[in-house]
Amino acid sequence: MEINEFIKNFANQFDETDITEFQPETNFRELEEWSSLVALAVMNMIGKKYGVKLSPDEMRTTSVIKDLFALVQSKK
């Protein structure tokens, strides 16, 4: 699993945010489009693409894409 692929999959959960906004250091919670529905979509994507089930509490512990990536890696 590579971070660039993870970022692409993460970015695909957003409809209006430009792909260039997504970098490893991006604080996704500060993005205008971030919402609880996007969070659920991200959690669903992580489950389907990476076979990792995140709880809402685990999701809340991260706010930067690279930290979320590290969390997913740690559960694989």
Image (spheres, rainbow, N blue to C red):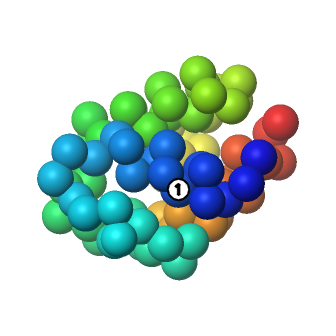
Q: Nearer the viewer, residue 47 or 19?
A: 19
* Residue at left offset 77%, top offset 46%: 1
Which amino acid type corresponds to the residue marked 1 in the rendered image? Ile
In this figure, which residue is indicated by the disc labeled 1? Answer: 7
The secondary structure type at the circle numbered 1 is helix
31 displayed left or right of 42 = left
Q: Is residue 74 visible?
A: yes
Residue 52 x %, y %: 69, 29
The answer to which image quadrant residue 31 occupies is bottom left
Q: Nearer the viewer, residue 45 or 18?
A: 18
Figure check: 7 above or below 73:
below
User: Which residue in the rendered view is the most extreme toward the bottom?
Assistant: 25
* Residue at left offset 48%, top offset 65%: 63
Q: Nearer the viewer, residue 17 or 41?
A: 17
Few, some or many C-alpha atoms within 10 Å of disc 1 (few <14, some 14-19, many ≥20)? some
* Residue at left offset 62%, top offset 66%: 66
Residue 34 x %, y %: 26, 54
53 displayed left or right of 63 = right
Residue 6 x %, y %: 59, 50
41 displayed left or right of 67 = left
Q: Is residue 62 visible?
A: no
